[in-house]
Image (cartoon, rainbow, N blue to C red):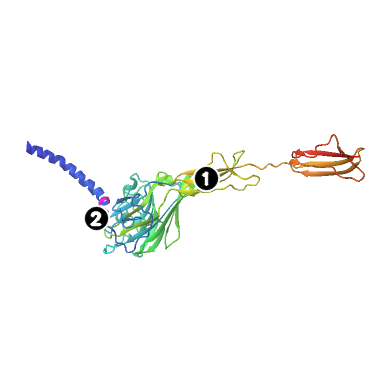
């Protein structure tokens, strides 16, 4: 019975051991990359920037460089590796964002495994989240001719390997010079990526340097449909290159996406692919400034400003013909203050129309007691207070006082009204 019991225990332990081994196979790259590969040996020191080692998530063989906290090694200088780094939360494509980083795509000092395959900046809403990935090699960790490609995504690839004869995932659109790399906008799909799938393709020479990359997203509405433009500048070779998406939802299956960088090496090369963050994208706040007619509520002007989290404003009133000075409306957000990422402030200024009335008229008559006219004057005055209009001096006459039917010599008068002031003399 002891032998039988021992055999039964072994049978129970074996499946558990296999499961543990499989789990380690899946997670070992991410868990052991830093411990195994250590600090990478770049040919040039990474540019400085904000630390991301405690906030951004790495996948695959990617790991944080302990010497440069803004730098993530996407793939160690080994063959057939892949890795990625992803922002700490999704970004809202109805808001603008900007990312500035430096890319390193070269060999590691002391190793001579060639250069390839490349890095991709990614916007994606794959069901796998930050664990979305494509295949290695020409797949660059985003492409694959099957369902393992990065779904619901748009990428900017920086391909450092000559893939002209590949039938695997990314056919190089430039087939003349193996020393020429390329960048392009690509929408990963369930298929081999062909030259025609590379949009706005640009070519650049190999480089051992850290190259500056600036990426910007600008939302844009087409009618009621949210779209937007993804732009980048891979300095120092070209100006900004852009591609506009007319319907965010049709591309990404939603308006919020993960963002980050993915990379891979090939079966024949082992680049040290790395990214050094210089400016990280943060969701911005929005300040809407509305100028309204105080009485009717009609909008005289509306403005919208995308601002960085922190201090905003001050915003001031504007000038509108026929209106007085604007004042901050009851219930409005302050014209200046603090704003958080993704927060919206509505600053409302009320304006009251200037009161425009007809002028008034004051007629001053000087008469003798017998009714002889000595003098008459007419004065055009603004509505409001008028006068005083006093008696005058006439030789040989003395002032007798106001006529009993006269209006007062001073007082209030309305627009279009008439006052008769009659002075009598004897």
Magenta residues?
30-35
Q: Pointer 2: residues within 10 angstroms few (<14), some, or many (20+)? A: few
Residue receiving disc 2: 36
Residue 360 falls in image quadrant: top right
Could you say which is closer to the camera, residue 245 or residue 263?
263
Taking the spot 24% from the left edge, 50% from the top edge, the residue there is 28
Mark 1 crowd level (few <14, some 14–19, many ≥20, 10 Å Cα): some
Q: Indicate whether 296 appears above or below 142.
A: above
Where residue 377 sits: x, y (%)?
Answer: 84, 44
Residue 297: percent from left, percent from top? 59, 39
Q: What residue would you read off at disc 1?
A: 288
- Quadrant in the picture for residue 157: bottom left
Residue 190, percent from left and from top: 34, 49
Using the rendered image of the protein, determine whether residue 337 is visible from the camera's viewpoint: yes
Quadrant position of the C terminus in the picture: top right
Q: Position of residue 358 (x, y in %)?
A: 74, 41
Identify the element where label 2 is drawn. helix
Between residues 31 and 388, which one lies in front from this camera angle?
Answer: 388
Characterize the magenta stretch by its predominant secondary structure: helix
Quadrant containing the N terminus is top left
Which label belongs to residue 385?
none
The answer to whether one can see residue 245 in this image is no
User: CA separation, marks 2 and 1?
Assistant: 52 Å
């Amino acid at each position: 019975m002891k032998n039988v019991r021992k055999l039964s225990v072994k049978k129970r332990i074996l499946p558990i051991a296999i499961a543990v081994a499989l789990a380690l196979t899946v997670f070992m790259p991410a868990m052991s990359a830093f411990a195994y590969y250590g600090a990478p040996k770049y040919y040039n020191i990474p540019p400085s920037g904000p630390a991301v080692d405690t906030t951004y998530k790495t996948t695959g063989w990617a790991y944080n460089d302990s010497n440069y906290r803004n730098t993530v090694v996407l793939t160690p200088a080994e063959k057939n590796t892949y890795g990625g780094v992803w922002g700490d939360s999704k970004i809202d494509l109805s808001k603008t964002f900007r990312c500035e980083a430096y890319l390193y795509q070269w060999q590691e000092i002391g190793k001579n495994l060639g250069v390839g395959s490349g890095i991709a900046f990614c916007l994606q809403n794959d069901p796998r989240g930050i664990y979305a990935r494509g295949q290695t090699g020409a797949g660059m960790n985003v492409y694959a001719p099957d369902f393992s490609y990065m779904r619901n995504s748009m990428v900017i690839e920086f391909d450092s390997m000559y893939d002209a004869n590949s039938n695997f995932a990314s056919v190089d659109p430039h087939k003349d010079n193996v020393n020429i790399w390329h960048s392009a906008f690509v929408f990963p799909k369930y298929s081999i990526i062909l030259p025609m799938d590379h949009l706005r393709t640009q070519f650049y020479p190999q480089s051992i340097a850290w190259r500056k990359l600036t990426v910007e997203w600008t939302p844009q509405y087409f009618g009621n449909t949210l779209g937007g433009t993804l732009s980048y500048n891979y300095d120092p070779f070209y100006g900004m290159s852009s591609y506009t998406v007319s319907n965010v939802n049709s591309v990404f299956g939603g308006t919020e996406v993960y963002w980050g960088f993915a990379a891979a090496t090939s079966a024949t090369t082992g680049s040290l692919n790395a990214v050094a963050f210089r400016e990280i994208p943060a969701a911005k706040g929005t300040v809407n400034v509305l100028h309204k007619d105080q009485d009717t509520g009609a909008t005289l002007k509306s403005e919208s400003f995308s601002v960085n989290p922190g201090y905003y404003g001050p915003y001031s009133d504007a000038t509108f013909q026929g209106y007085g000075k604007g004042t901050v409306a009851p219930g409005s957000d302050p014209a200046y203050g603090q704003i958080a990422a993704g927060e919206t402030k509505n600053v409302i200024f009320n304006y009251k129309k200037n009161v425009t009335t007809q002028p008034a008229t004051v007629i001053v008559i000087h008469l003798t007691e017998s009714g002889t006219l000595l003098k008459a004057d007419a004065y055009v005055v603004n509505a409001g207070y008028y006068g005083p209009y006093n008696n005058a001096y006439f030789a040989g006459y003395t002032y007798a006082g106001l006529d009993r039917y006269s209006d007062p010599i001073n007082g209030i008068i309305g627009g279009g009204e008439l006052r008769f002031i009659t002075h009598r003399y004897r």
